Amino acid sequence: MAVLRESPWYQQILREGEQRGEERGRQEEILSGIELALEIKFGSEGLELMPEISQISDLEQLEVIKRRFKTLNTLDELRGLISSIQTFST
């Protein structure tokens, strides 16, 4: 087992797994912040957008959504932002 742990392949797999775990944790953290902002700013109607937002996996795009809550005034503005992000991703 010690020989396996010292192998370059094992170390690479371990690093990749750690990186994926960190990214997943960051994604969950951002989504949690978005969910809270939706509820505070738009109530239960805003929370209806969470399934759509949760489909976005790019951390930078999720950060854009989170930051835009400072300037968003309506759900239609948020829907437009989500739509533009989804269009950009494809």
Image (tube, rainbow, N blue to C red):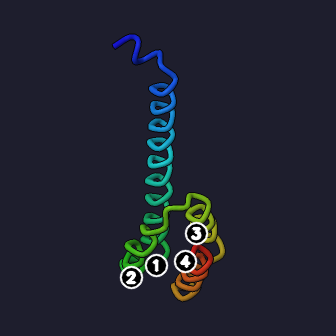
Q: Residue furthest top?
A: 2
> What is the spatial separation of the Cα atoms under label 4 and label 1, in whole angstroms?
21 Å
- Circle 3 packing at 10 Å, graded few (<14), some (14-19), many (20+), is many
The residue labelled by disc 3 is: 65
Amino acid type for the residue under numbered disc 1: Phe
Secondary structure of residue under mark 1: helix
On residue 63, the disc is: none
At 49% from the left and 62% from the top, the residue drawn is 57
Q: CA distance from mark 1 to mark 3?
A: 14 Å
Residue 72 location, quadrant: bottom right
Point out which mark residue 45 bears: 2
Contact check, label 3 and label 4, Cβ < 8 Å: no
Decide which of tag 3 and tag 4 comes sooner along the chain: 3
Are the residues flagged by discs 2 and 3 in contact, CB closer than 8 Å? no
Give the residue at mark 1: 42
Instruction: Look at the numbered disc 2 and give the secondary structure of its residue.
Output: helix
> Which residue has dot 4 on it?
86
Cα separation, mark 2 vs mark 1, equals: 6 Å
Q: Amino acid at mark 4?
A: Gln
The answer to whether 68 is drawn above or below residue 8 in the figure is: below
Q: CA distance from mark 3 to mark 4?
A: 12 Å
Q: Position of residue 34 (x, y in %)?
A: 49, 64
